Image (cartoon, rainbow, N blue to C red):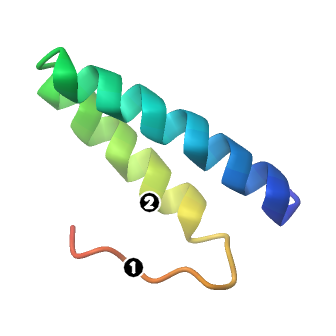
């Protein structure tokens, strides 16, 4: 996948994560955060978050 498409997907996923957090859907938001992290790892300039 091209890096610009990864960035686009990450933006959309982060918006969805924000919505889930605002709606107190914490379990779903936590799972989505893991997906976001895994996708971000495909970027060459990725800096791992402190989740782990």
If the image is split into quadrants, where does the N terminus sit? bottom right
**Helix, strand or loop under label 1:** loop
Quarter-of-image position of residue 2: bottom right
Question: Where residue 52 sits: x, y (%)?
Answer: 21, 73
Considering every residue shown, the one lying at the far top of the view is 23
Against 29, is 2 above or below?
A: below
Question: Where residue 32 sits: x, y (%)?
Answer: 37, 38
Q: Which of pointers 2 and 1 lies earlier in the amino acid sequence?
A: 2
Q: CA distance from mark 2 to mark 1?
A: 8 Å
- At 39% from the left and 79% from the top, the residue drawn is 48
- At 16% from the left and 29% from the top, the residue drawn is 27
Quarter-of-image position of residue 15: top left
Mark 2 touching mark 1, by CB under 8 A?
yes
Question: Where residue 7 sits: x, y (%)?
Answer: 69, 55
> Mark 2 — residue?
37
**Helix, strand or loop under label 2:** helix
Direction from residue 19 to residue 46 in the image, left or right: right
> Mark 1 — residue?
48
- At 32% from the left and 32% from the top, the residue drawn is 18
Would you call the spot at circle 1 few (<14 residues within 10 Å), some (14-19), or many (20 or more)?
few
- At 58% from the left and 34% from the top, the residue drawn is 12
């Amino acid at each position: 996948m091209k890096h610009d498409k990864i960035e686009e997907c990450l933006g959309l996923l982060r918006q969805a994560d924000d919505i889930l957090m605002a709606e107190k859907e914490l379990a779903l938001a936590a799972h989505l955060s893991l997906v976001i992290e895994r996708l971000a790892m495909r970027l060459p300039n990725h800096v791992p978050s402190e989740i782990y």
